[in-house]
């Protein structure tokens, strides 16, 4: 009986080691490299007069105080709430919240990244370029859908700001919260190389959220939090809030190393930041659920779970490495 049990245990151990090696092998072999190649059409934006101009590069020195990168995918129906009147209106009023001595210095741009939409998102966004001018609003239209992470990265790589803010198209966070998030950035930014990231966080709203969610979704959420903590990022309660502020230097360092372009990209971004010892602040922000907001379907949670495990394994096996950012074309 004992021998039989020992054999079963040996078999199980052998099976689990084989399974682990298989997972490692799959993670290693399916690892995509950083895809920074731009389609020719993605190198230009349109001016208010409809002329083509080349986008600058994040490797150039900054020429503005703030760039706001807004990823948008099939947002036309919600464009009234999208970077439309809500988000842009908020932003264009925003400089007036800032103390008067700042005001003449406060320059900013909004880069709306159309992530390969199948509707008129680009045309809707271009109306704002016409209304406010191309110095304030630029539209980057991606040839194919990359996913939110890919869209934010492409927008970031052609921004001009000293600070770069990623914000959701549905304007779920109020721009008044920029000041809070920026204060968090100054708190942690003590490095001579000007590296810092400040993340908006909804962790303080979690209890209410749990009350409203089904048991299953809550279970998935906590499972996701555990995986994030176990595999990738510690010390940050809400990695997924779409409101994050980067110094230009931190954006260059993290976004040029990013591999994941879909749901779990925030986690890899913060993982990269922690590997590079970039300080990260987490700041509570207000959050309103926007009608028609893209709810994360169950299979996306599972995909995210898989991505989290794979992110870590790919760095462990050396399929992905962090090095000094390469030159992009």
Image: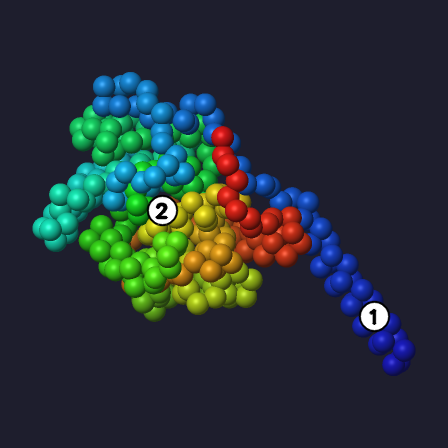
Q: Which mark is residue 248?
A: 2
Relative vertical location of residue 245 with respect to residue 67 in this rendering, above or below: below
Q: Residue 9: x percent and y percent?
A: 81, 72
Label 1 sits on a secondary structure element that is helix
Residue 155 in sight: no
Image mark count: 2
Mark closest to the chain's N terminus, 2 or 1: 1
Label 2: state its secondary structure: helix
User: Farthest residue in the bottom direction?
Assistant: 2
Query: From the viewer's perspective, is 218 left or right of 283?
Result: right
Residue nearer the viewer, 84 or 215 = 84
> Does residue 181 lie above or below 85 as drawn?
below
How far is the residue under mark 2 from the one under mark 1? 53 Å
Seen at 67% across and 48% down, the residue is 28
User: Is the residue marked by circle 1 packed among few (<14), some (14-19), or many (20+) residues within 10 Å?
Assistant: few
**297 displayed left or right of 108:** right
- Residue positioned 45% across, 40% down in the render: 150
In this view, 52 is above or below 261: above
From the viewer's perspective, tell me whether residue 226 is left or right of residue 10.
Answer: left
Query: What residue is disc 1 on?
Result: 10
CB within 8 Å, label 2 to label 1? no
């Amino acid at each position: 009986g004992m021998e039989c049990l020992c054999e079963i245990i040996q078999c199980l151990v052998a099976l689990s080691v084989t399974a682990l090696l298989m997972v490692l092998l799959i993670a290693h072999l399916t690892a995509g490299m950083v895809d920074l190649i731009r389609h020719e059409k993605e190198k230009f934006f349109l001016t208010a007069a409809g002329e083509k101009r080349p986008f600058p590069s994040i490797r150039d020195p900054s020429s503005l105080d703030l760039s706001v990168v807004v990823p948008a995918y099939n947002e036309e129906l919600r464009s009234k709430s999208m970077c439309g009147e809500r988000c842009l209106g908020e932003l264009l009023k925003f400089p007036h919240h800032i103390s008067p001595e700042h005001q003449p210095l406060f320059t900013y741009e909004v880069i709306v990244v159309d992530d390969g939409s199948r509707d008129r998102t680009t045309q809707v966004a271009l109306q704002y370029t016409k209304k406010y001018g191309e110095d304030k609003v630029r539209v980057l239209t991606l040839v194919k859908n990359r996913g939110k992470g890919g869209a934010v990265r492409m927008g970031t790589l052609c921004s001009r700001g000293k600070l770069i803010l990623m914000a959701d198209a549905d304007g779920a966070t109020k721009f008044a919260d920029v000041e809070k998030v920026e204060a968090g950035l100054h708190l942690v930014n003590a490095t001579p190389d000007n590296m810092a990231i400040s993340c908006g966080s909804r962790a303080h709203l979690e209890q209410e959220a749990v009350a409203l969610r089904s048991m299953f979704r809550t279970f998935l959420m906590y499972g996701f939090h555990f995986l994030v903590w176990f595999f990738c990022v510690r010390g940050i309660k809400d990695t997924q809030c779409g409101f994050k502020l980067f110094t230009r230097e931190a954006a260059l360092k993290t976004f040029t190393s990013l591999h994941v372009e879909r749901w779990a990209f925030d986690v890899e971004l913060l993982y990269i930041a922690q590997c590079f010892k970039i300080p990260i602040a987490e700041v509570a922000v207000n959050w309103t659920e926007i009608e028609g907001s893209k709810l994360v379907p169950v299979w996306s949670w599972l995909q995210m779970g898989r991505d989290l495990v794979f992110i870590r394994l790919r760095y462990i096996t050396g399929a992905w490495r962090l090095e000094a950012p390469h030159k992009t074309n």
